[in-house]
Every structure is written in structure tokens, then in C-alpha cells.
Image: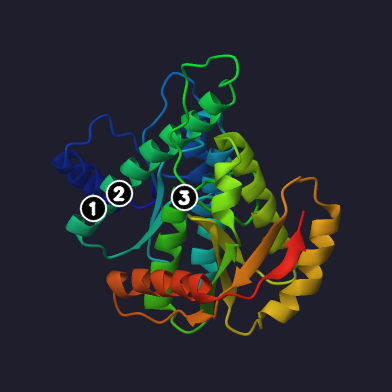
Amino acid sequence: MDDDPSILELLESVLAAFGYEDIVTARSGQEALDILNDPKEVFDCLLLDVQMPQMNGIALCEEARKLPGYTFTPIIMVTAMVQKQYIDEAFEAGATDYVTKPFEFSDLKQRLGDAYRMAAERRAAIEVFEADGYTWQEPEVSSEMRLSDPLFFSDLPGCMGLSEFENYVIQLSTMHSMVSKIVAIKVAEVERIFQSSSAAEFRKTMGAAGAALLMATKNERNFATYWGNGVFLLLLDSEMELSPGQLRAPLSEVADSSSTDTTMAFQVGKEVALKASSKMEALFLIDKAVEMAEMIEDQVAQFG
């Protein structure tokens, strides 16, 4: 969906060459939203430009996420806008990935494939949680969730899926290096919590932990994701100071008002500056942050 006819024609040709069929285009955000609201056809993927008349692509992305058929649909921004403000707003609105023009066709093809795979995995994970809820009534249904699995909390503002978070980190660390930093925070003794919980119970507990962390840093614009193994990743502006001592008081306040019955504590890793020259270097920074949290033995704030 783009307001430039030449770009639309180019994308149609490229997508057709990739093997994608039934391509529908729109030249304005409102026209695109009208198409999406038609229940006769639900699209498998959306490509949106940021700058479009009547309704920009970021607002369209946000509206699309509210539609029942587009909760897990890949939404890729394909735009010339490289400013951090637009990248932040796009991922906050629910974008899966962010591709800047001019783009390499091979890169777009790979991103489309990654987005489709991520959406399929997420649907499968949600089905596991739903099945686990019926375990007592249906003994033959068994949960296959692993402790290492990333979790997606669509009902937690500021918390995005791991794939979106990785794409966001790649954009910031390669295009706007040193303006942000990443810190990993691990739920202590998460193995014990996992082993004593059903999949649905474990997801609820981790959701409560994520809500506590986001609330503890609510005065700053931040994004988070659940990496797996009880580890949350927080992406913060470089100016924000974050230390175990600074988190102790706000986390304790959240713990006092929490409805979870599980006792938890947090391990806060050292901050990692986001500066990379490639996708692989950016992903390495995430792994480095996780390793920092795994090495910490001091626990911060009892929770629950």
C-alpha cells in the first residue's frame, strides 16, 4: 500500500516474481483500511508505506491490528522514512519489520519469509496455551511448551514479540547507533516456576513479571520482549539510568499490588549499548545482554 504508482507497480512485479499471488494495492491509508474491513478476503501479509494520504501507514498498522483477522498477520513497513521517530512509532503500532527504500529485492524476499514463519510459529504457540487450558477436561491433550520458548504478550503495552524486537534492535543499532541500550532481566529460579506450572499458568506468571518491569520504567519510553528461559529484554534510551538499586523500590511496589501467587525475584544484567554495522552484530548484542543477566547472582526485589 503506497501512494506512488510506480512503487506499487514495482512491488507487484517483484512479489509476483517471488511467487506471491492475489496481490491487492491501495494508494491511500483509508482506501487500504476499507479493503481490510471487507470480510470477504483476509490477506496473509501487509506491506505499508509510512507516508500515505488520508491515513499514514503507522496509523493504518495500528488500525489493522485491531481487526480480528490481523492479530498475527505480518505487517512490513516499506518506506523512505529513516528517522528514529518513525521506526519507534511503527513498531509500537504493531509492525513486524521495517524496510527502508531503496531496498534489495533479495533482502525483501528474506524478510517476507521470516515474517511468514514467525506468524505461523506464533499461532502454533497460542494454540498450545489454549490446549493447556483444557488439559483437565481432555487428558489426551498435552502441552509441548518448553522453558526456552519465547512468549508473545499482545495484551501488554510496550511488550512485543521476539522477532519484532530483534528487527527493531537491528534498525536502531545499524541506523541510529548509540541512542539506545539494551538490558536483560531474568526471573530467578525460573526452572522451579516452570516445572510447577501449566503452560497457561507459566504464561500468566511471566506476563505479571513483564508488566512489573515495564511499570518500573514507565517514566521513560521503552520496549520489551520475553526472550525465553525467564529472561526479559528491555530497550531504553541511552540517557536513562537503570541499575538493580533503582529497580528495587518500584518493583517492590508492583509486587505488593500483584495478583500472582508465585514468588519471584529478578536478576538485572549490565547494559549493552546498541551499536552495530550489520544484522549479525545487532543480534550478537542481544545474546550479549542475555549472557550478562545469566551471570548475575544478586536478586532484585521479591515479587508476589
User: For the residue marked with disc 3, what is the amino acid?
Assistant: Pro
User: For the residue marked with disc 2, what is the amino acid?
Assistant: Asp
Label 3 vs label 2, nearer the camera: 3
**Quadrant assignment for the N terminus:** top left
* Secondary element at image label 2: helix
Mark closer to the chain start, 3 or 2? 2
* Secondary element at image label 3: loop
Q: Which residue is mark 2?
A: 114
Give coordinates of residue 25: x percent, y percent: 35, 38
Q: CA distance from mark 3 to mark 2?
A: 16 Å
Q: Which residue is mark 1?
A: 110
Q: CA distance from mark 1 to mark 2?
A: 6 Å
How crowded pointer 1 is (Cα within 10 Å; few <14, some 14-19, many 20+) is rated as few
Foreground of the two, 303 or 279: 303
Foreground of the two, 88 or 81: 88
Q: Which residue is mark 3?
A: 150
Q: Is residue 135 left or right of residue 26?
A: right
Give coordinates of residue 9: x percent, y percent: 24, 46
